[in-house]
Image (cartoon, coloured by chain):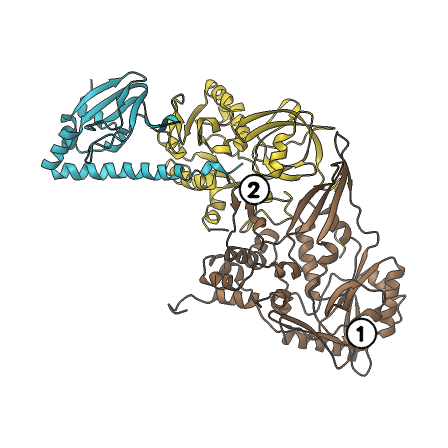
Chain colours: A cyan, B brown, C yellow
Amino acid sequence: MRTLDQVVLEARVFAGLDDTFAEQLAGCSQTAGFEAGDTLFREGEPADVFYVLRRGRVALELYVPGRGELTIETIDPGSVVGWSWLFPPHLWHFDARAVAPVRAVAVDGACLRGKCEQDPALGYELMQRFSAVLLERLNATRLRLADLYGGGHGG
Amino acid sequence: MIRLDGLSRLVGALQARGYQVVGPKLREGAILYDELASADELPAGWTEIHDPGSYRVERRDDDARFGFTVGPHSWKQFLLPSRVRLWRARVNGGAPEIEEEPPPEKPFAFFGVRSCDLAAIGIQDRVLTGGRYADHDYAARREGIFVVVVDCAEPGRLCFCDSMGTGPSAESGFDLALTELVGDEHRFLVRIGSERGAEIMEDVPHEDANPADRDEASTLVDNARASMGRTLDTEGLKEDILQNLEHPRWDEVADRCLSCGNCTLVCPTCFCVGVEDTADLTGETIERTRVWNSCFSLDHSYVAGGSVRQSGRSRYRQWMTHKLATWHDQFGTSGCVGCGRCIAWCPVGIDITEEAAAIREEVGDANA
Amino acid sequence: MAVEPLLVSPGPMVPEPYVVRSRGRETADTWTIELEPVAGEAIDPEPGQFAMLTAYGVGEVPISLSGRGEGGSLIHTIRDVGAVTAELCRISRGGTIGVRGPFGTTWPLEDARGADVVVLAGGLGLAPLRPAVEGLLAERDSYGRVFLLYGARTPGDLLYPQQLEDWRAEGLDVRLTVDAGTRSWLDRVGFVSALLDDVTLDEPAVALVCGPEVMMRVTIGALQQRGVPPARTYVSLERSMSCGIGHCGHCQLGPILICRDGPVFTWDEVGGLLAVREL
């Protein structure tokens, strides 16, 4: 049975994280599970947690009147679900739903923010790692915005 | 050596052998290539004055038959005409029965080919028949043409055949080559370049050339070589151009270029074509036609979604880099023969030699 | 001085008539047609090559081979983007389409033997890659790991959905993604390069890539990080073509003629050229 601080290191964003930091992270964490179809969180609700996904798949959804629920991103094991806990007003921007049975580590956002304030080194380390992921996601999203498949493509 | 009567007899002999003789004629204020009924139709006593963006004909002091260089036409009018039907077909509900267009009945005799234009024909030969596939129509028209070259004694102001290694005199690739000597006696030194050339001379009154004639002819050619109107340094040119695809000069020339495509029309090596499929109103008869295209049109680089070369800058760059650089990669030679036509016929007088030199200058000074 | 003509009869611009044996709709604007010759044997294109397809009286366009059917029939997937392709998509079973070819270079199925292979497709890009995938599966033991990574705009834009399932069932590692999905879409949503995230490859692997040019440019970087060198990354390019035989000048990309030197190239050969705007 692996301990939580070992488990959080499975996430790509935390790979190679210092033992002390991992311990602090684990101190705010607990395991979580969802059945396929379960909602992890809804748009507008308070965002005080994020999930380190170990198994399954989570869909981020946006409800568009007339078009229904659009899946705008899926997150696979090794990635993090949820960023709205980082900054005020700490409210979810999207719905999140388990597409397949999910096993995750749920990290308490408020708890982690508190620890970061007490230990700026932890805060800085996490900011660096989170920024990298956000940048990657941003760029990938921009590419989807370019709507490249429409025309002028290979074949 | 032949004299003026020999020149006329040469045209006659070609016609008698079934050639369609085409050569320079004065028409519509220019010297164009057209059907020659006789040597009398040559532009005797006329010359051309070329400047960037300007062309006009002028009377000479003498009555030289070939006292000019090149006009707006090149021999691609005949070998790669601007509109050619490739085939037509009858559609009877099932598979169309295709009839390829036969080539012209009579082979051409090109009378008065400049060495630069002869080199251009060789360049188009490589493009259109030197690869895996041969252009049928071009190959058929090309086969069996009779070539009478005329050496240049007076290069034009825009000529740079010497820089491109294509003139002013041709070494090979012709049936006959003439050097016109206008002096006390109007005569032509004839160099025979093939068996056909030798054969036809049997029907043309001629004398042996004496050393003085040969000397006079070769002096003319040497002088011509030394008095080119333009030069182009081709050493390392391809690399210099390809390493400067974002040179500010491209923006500068783009400000002047109208993308009119005149240069591609008059250039003797430009070969870009498009293919049009059409049907008559009943839909029963269909045709495929090959037409000249120009890389200056937006259409030329159209892919689903838009044209790749949208800016005038990119299209000028395409033309010039193809002509002077990437032609080497694609076909093993330069695409330019130094005829200078593009400079004369550009409405704003863009000079390819000047542009090439500008690109090669270092972009050093911040004020440049 | 007279040129030695390499004349074949009929000339290289004359299409052979083929009959539409079957046709089916793939997506809102894309159709797949199967062609068999009216007489004689079908031409024999290899994966990666293309044919010039004529809609008689309308025009001719280059279309990559998308498969072979019974008796060597030709399978082509065509997107309706203009007058000619609209007509090719419209011609019903029993109708006639002209074919010239095959032209161009092939996917390097020989050279890839012994290596891990990533087939990366975007949008309509799976069409020219399908014969390559079929070729890899036909000699599965000659290759290491084989992946098909495929992205499209929406689930409805994915080509050959049944075949994707069949390939999965056969054991091919197929990973799909779309730009935006709906509730019924249970697979990934995200940009196609993200599919590389959990792919492990032994160097030097081979990648076969086809899709929008921007997609290819972006994923090449991700491929390099995964151990696929540019010299072993193959792409299929597209440009305007009027002849397919190196005579019309339309398909130039700098020093190369895409109909003659391509359409399949290594990234080494074309990466630099594609980086020059409007070349």
Measure how far apart labels 2 and 1 are at the Cα level: 51 Å
Quarter of the view holding residue A140: top left
Residue wearing tag 1:
B188
Asked if residue C106 lies left or right of residue A68, the reply is right
What amino acid does circle 1 point to? Answer: Phe
Q: Position of residue C60 (x, y in %)?
A: 65, 39
* Horizontal arrangement in the rendering, residue C241 relative to residue C145 (left or right): right
Task: Give the residue drawn at x 15%, y 36%.
Answer: A122
Q: Can you name the residue that lies furthest to the front here?
A: A66
In x, y percent, where is residue B12?
Answer: 88, 65
Discs 2 and 1 lie in a common subunit? no
Q: Is residue B70 above or below residue C3?
A: below
Q: Quadrant of the C terminus of chain B?
A: bottom left
* Chain to which mark 2 belongs: C
User: Mark 2 and 1 residues: CB-CB less than 8 Å, in contact?
Assistant: no
> Does dot 1 land on a helix, a strand or a loop?
strand
What amino acid does circle 2 point to? Gly
Specify whether B189 is left or right of A146.
Answer: right
Q: Which residue is mark 2?
A: C262
In this rendering, is residue A73 above or below C225? Answer: above
Q: Regarding mark 2 in the picture, which secondary structure is present there?
A: loop
Q: Is residue C116 visible?
A: no
Relative placement, left or right, of C138 versus A120 is right
Q: How crowded is the residue under tag 1: few (<14 C-alpha within 10 Å), some, or many (20+)?
A: many
Residue B214: x and y in percent read: 77, 76
